Amino acid sequence: MPDDCQLPPPIDYNRMIAPGSEELAVRLMQLMFPRIEDAWQKLDGVYVQVVEPRSSLRLDDRYLGRWRSGGLHVTAMFAAVDALMAVQTILEPVIAGTGSLPMSALFPMIRAAIESASLAIYLLEPLDRDERLRRSYLVAAEDARYLSTFGEALGRETNTVRADAQAHIRELLATRPSIEAGAPFSFERVQYSDLVENADAVMAADPATPKVERMALIAWWKLLSGLSHGKQWAFVELMERSEAVVDEANESAYVKLTSSAAGVAIPLQLAVEALEAALRLFGHRSKEAWNQREDASEPIAISFKELRGDH
């Protein structure tokens, strides 16, 4: 028979993970649980609650107005740890053999943890105060945009929400002219893909993050986003397939889709590492021992009322 008349090979609609991988993935999940607890203890304790008076973060407050006291980055870290704790709560009975692994419900939570940790990293990572403040202003302006669209969905009058936030940021910029010394400040969009790519680079440069060959954080985030939004390509890419009922004439099949433990464990580890990186950065910025040279010339930190001139 001529080559051009050969039939294509039969399609294998089933796909299962390699034997032994599930046991390793379960062990990896178990190793993450104490680290999630440790992150929670830091967030709910003095590690985050105490910001030293002459630390970089406390000195930032002078230029942050209504966004002072770390609300932007602390909220993000709490959101990350909350998502991770929810994943742990679901996984513990699965590992104990008294529950089953959801097909896709865990992936939006892991994605949320990565996004929130990446936001905190973006806000805390720069050594330079001007860059930290610039990023805070961009995130604050973006938050105002979302608040405005949320208000519109509720039927509220929100015409001034974004304008008020941007006007307040302009007032704050006037107190820190060095931010615009190189170029005028503009309200650029802050995309989550940019935040995750930045976190990827920061974690790669962080000696405390294990250096192993694996899929990049941004790649996992794209995959988790597809899974979170019910995109077929993402389910085809990650899910295990079994019990195929094949329609030979239509060259298609009805298959049972399941998440493998490895498909959950690996992005879970990355999410935990991202939050740990954010917490390390917070520790550096909130402790006087990690101060930068520029901090020595900053005025003493005073309360917001004093800064505003209230008596």
Image (tube, rainbow, N blue to C red):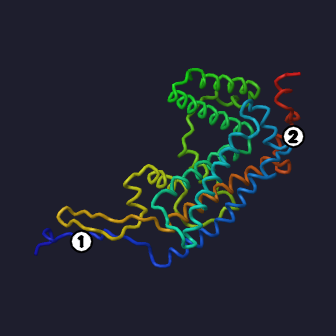
Q: In the rendered view, would you say 102 is above or below 163?
A: below
Q: Is residue 128 left or right of residue 217?
A: right
Q: Is residue 40 left or right of residue 268?
A: right
User: SS at mark 1?
Assistant: loop
Report the residue that reaches farthest toward the bottom: 20
Name which residue lies at 81% across and 51% down.
46
* Residue 128, image x, y percentages: 74, 41
Q: Residues within 10 Å of mark 2 (few under 14, many from 20)?
A: few
- The kind of residue on which mark 2 rests is Ala
Front residue of 121 and 244: 244
Q: In the rendered view, would you say 22 is above or below 124?
A: below
Image quadrant holding the C terminus, namely: top right
Front residue of 244 and 235: 244
Q: Is residue 155 left or right of residue 48?
A: left
Of mark 2 and mark 1, the one earlier in the sequence is 1
Q: In the rendered view, would you say 172 is above or below 35?
A: above
* Residue 24, image x, y percentages: 55, 75
- The kind of residue on which mark 1 rests is Pro
Residue named by callout 2:
296
